[in-house]
Image (cartoon, rainbow, N blue to C red):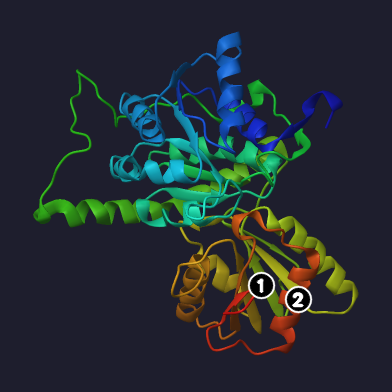
Amino acid sequence: MTAKNLRFINGDEAVALGVALARPDVIAAYPITPQTIAVEKLSEYVDTGTLDAEYIQVESEHSALAAVMGASAMGVRTFTATSSQGLLYMCEVLHYVPGSRFPIIMMNANRSVAAPWSIYGDQSDSMAMLNSGWIQVYVENAQEALDMVIQAYKIAENPSVLLPIMINLDGFILTHTYELVEIPEQSAVDAFLPSYTTHNKMDLANPVNQSITVGPDWHTEYRYQQHVVMERAIDVIEAVDKDFGIAFKRTYGGMIDAYKADDADAVLITVGSVTSTARDVVDMLRERGESVGLLKLRYIRPFPAKELVETLAHAKAIGVLEKDVSYGYEGTVYTDVCAALYKGGVNARPYNFIAGLSGRDISRETIADMYHTMLHHAPDKSDVLFADLRWKS
């Protein structure tokens, strides 16, 4: 690695650089905190000629996704970005895109949803959209954010997938925090990510129907195909990550990334930027002789059930740390994890830790307490523990 390849940038800027390296044809943008820097940077690249793309400034998030959906229908590479209420505003179009098999890449800056109103980060926005049919990946740092943009286009545009991908970055923690990021050479990205071509486009020479209306007699078949290609994407995700490692000397483990989990009695599952802190805690507790490990859940859709079961089969206690809650039941990720463990025959005690809502800090001490709970205490009746609650009802 040479100094010329390194830049001190934040997560939003890393996403913008990744997008520019991927050479999209159309970008549609509407600003919303804490995503705005990403689309501002892309507008600068287009304005200066660094990026040859059509940049459309629209009047809403709904219009932003509709614009890139229209462009994708013409068979070109596209990008948009959003956050929080903006993602919710996109909801109608969000379902149209995967159903029509348009491989749009979108960055979502994870942020709490109203009310109470908050500009700070948790993952309740994207978790609320898990059933929309988008592939969802959650990154740990700015380097992974940039690299995942490049990987995402290669995954989404694979003819056996053709699904949109939502790249999720923790708001402010990643979007606005500066760190050293290695920037790939354009020639290397071009070699890894060829120009996009597809038969799923509007073409006068070869007419096709898109975003069509069907009745009950065929609707199930369309949904079945959508489900099958989502599951098929797992193999593509794993292959693309390996190929990326060969090309750029960095790899992220594909669907999941385990750390000192092979022989651990207690394993904590994390999503997003908190993984870095949890990894430090694992090292600290290991030095004290505690049998602990970590599993970074990178993709929530498709869900890596098989990978989880294989990695966690030996564990005695498994905790899920997440920044969302499905009100009246438990954390969204916890539900999926428990289902996978049950079907896979894993008998570990499950724990659900809710923390970091609206950007509240998750300290090393808080995470260490989670491990202590898993190692030394049986779960309470609900199994759902608000790890940083300041009062009890």
Tell me the amino acid under the disc marked 2: Asp
Farthest residue, direction right: 287
Task: Judge whether 184 appears above or below 129 on screen.
Answer: above
Residue 133, can we see it? yes
Front residue of this view, candidates 326 and 143? 326
Task: Judge whether 181 appears above or below 262 on screen.
Answer: above
The residue at the point 20 percent across, 18 percent down is: 205
Q: Earlier in the sequence, mark 2 or mark 1?
A: 2
| Position of residue 69 measured from the top left corner of the image (x, y, whole percent) | 34, 31
What number is the disc on residue 369? 2
- Label 2 or label 1, whichever lies nearer to me, is 1
Residue carrying label 1: 387
Q: Seen in the image, is 189 located left or right of residue 7?
A: left
Q: Secondary structure at mark 1?
A: loop
Q: Answer few, some or many: residues within 10 Å of disc 2's Cα (few below 14, many 20 plus, some between 14 and 19).
A: few
What number is the disc on residue 53? none
Q: Seen in the image, is 180 located left or right of residue 81?
A: right
Tell me the amino acid under the disc marked 1: Ala
Residue 314, can we see it? no
| Position of residue 9 measured from the top left corner of the image (x, y, whole percent) | 74, 32
The answer to whether the residues at label 2 and label 1 have Cβ atoms under 8 Å apart is yes
The residue at the point 75 percent across, 35 percent down is: 181
Q: Quadrant of the C terminus?
A: bottom right
Q: How far is mark 2 from mark 1, CA to CA?
A: 9 Å
The residue at the point 59 percent across, 53 percent down is: 254
Task: Judge whether 67 appears above or below 265 on screen.
Answer: above
Q: Secondary structure at mark 2?
A: helix
Q: Answer few, some or many: residues within 10 Å of disc 1's Cα (few below 14, many 20 plus, some between 14 and 19).
A: some
| Position of residue 54 measured from the top left corner of the image (x, y, whole percent) | 45, 16
The residue at the point 60 percent across, 16 percent down is: 44
Front residue of this view, candidates 190 and 61? 61
Front residue of this view, candidates 212 and 345? 212
